[in-house]
Image: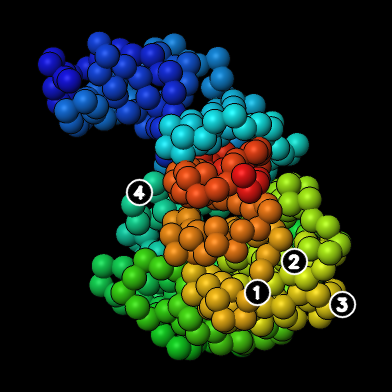
Amino acid sequence: MNEGLKKNDLVILEITDLGSTGEGIGRVDGFTLFVKDALIGDVIQAKVIKVKKSYGYGRLMEIVTPSPYRTEPRCVQARACGGCQIQPLAYEEQLKYKENKVRGLLERVGKVQDYVMEPIIGMEAPWHYRNKAQFPVGTTKDGEIVTGFYAGRTHSIVPVETCFIQHPENEKLMDIVRRWMNDHQVSAYDETTHKGLVRHIFTRIGKYTGEIMVCLVINGNKIPAAQDLIERLVQVPGMKSICLNLNREKTNVILGNEVKYLWGEHFITDFIGDVKYRISPLSFFQVNPVQTQKLYQTALEYGDIKKDEVVWDLYCGIGTISLFLAKHAKQVCGVEIVPQAIDDARENARLNDIQNASFFVGKAEEVVPQQYEENGISADVIVVDPPRKGCDEKLLDCMVKMAPERIVYVSCDPATLARDLKFLEEHGYKVMKVRCVDMFPHSVHVESVCLLSRK
């Protein structure tokens, strides 16, 4: 309970932990204060900006003694931009923070005990790892077109020329589109007025193939001077696909559902391990191909899949995990709600001559119970890789009824993972081991793979 602290007080405190979004956590006379941009080991002066009953928020005023883990960020915009929340933290410490975050949530929220936490898999070179970029487009006060990223928790654009986690080729692509917009007076979208044409520039670049897709997200259904844009972009080596994504909604969701192709193929291709994938504008594909291979390898190892076993892959996307597993199983069944992703998954199976994978369109929580109850489909192993919100309880319930020997849960949000593991442990399963994989260096996000066995 806070007796003494009030708004605008200046306090000195040591930061002992980081919160879930990377803010520093310290205590003043037992009262918890969250301070953005402060790191574990810093001694800081902070100004109290908000006081609740048992905790408050402070603004970093001065670093009195810097943390031994503090490093000079490579990016000058690291503090302003919302992308790399923990770039100033030494990489080894980032890994420790992520592993501790997962362990803490599993034990505190999931009540998970007696399991093996295997060492986190970090990156040897944690830079320029992203194969997908989404740059918002805006206008400066002087009418100049800018591209960059949103400042943390806002929708104001921080202009970024060089991003150290994106593919270096993006710099050239952004420059081409900005020049084309300036030359033809093509307007940038304004969120407040819902006017203007170009909302985002969305790119995908194959790590192993070098194939490039450029997609303009527009508030309309066509662009002026399209031919000139095409002529400029096709000069870039590796250009494979140029398209428009139509999004006329008043929303902060980046992509709309409709794609118009201007030039080239409707997809690019890339590899994870020796499996080749076709990737369309709307399909989900992991953004860090180097770490994705390690993530899937871990899932494969945890699943311990035998040649006579049937595997269900829920939230399968374009079949990324399904096809990785198919080479080791009797049959793999993938389920995904996005029809275009399932088209890609089927095409990817054909591309790799994989004949023991079948795919279903629909919500996993509807398809799986239907297949189980009506068609008596069973599973020896279930692999589940849900979005951030985790698994629907109806789906967890059905997974328990199907009673697979093993469940491999791949998670991008440790809080919902902990919640779902608690349910599964209360319904006949035991968490055996967990391993984190650093898919997003310099950000607070972490992926983890968890193996559960039937009790």
Point out residue 318 in the picture as x, y percentages from the top left corner: 66, 71
CB-based contact (under 8 Å), mark 1 and mark 2: yes
Check disc 2 and report the residue beneath it: 310
Q: CA separation, marks 1 and 2?
A: 9 Å
Give the CA separation, mark 4 to mark 1: 44 Å
Q: Earlier in the sequence, mark 3 or mark 4?
A: 4
Marker disc for residue 419: none
Residue 435 position, x and y percent, is 66, 39
For the point 40% across and 18% down, the residue is 15
- N-term-proximal mark, 4 vs 1: 4
In-front residue for pair 439/209: 439
Q: Mark 3, mark 2: which one is toward the viewer?
A: 2
Instruction: Give whichever of discs 3 and 1 has the lower sequence position.
Output: 3
Residue type, numbered disc 4: Arg
Query: Residue at label 1?
Result: 377
Q: Which residue is mark 4?
A: 153
Which image quadrant is residue 220 in?
bottom left
Q: Which residue is mark 3?
A: 353
**Which of the 4 quarters of the picture holds residue 114?**
top right
* Amino acid type indicated by mark 3: Asp
Q: Nearer the viewer, mark 3 or mark 4?
A: 3
The one nearer the camera, 5 or 419, is: 419
SS of the residue under disc 1: loop
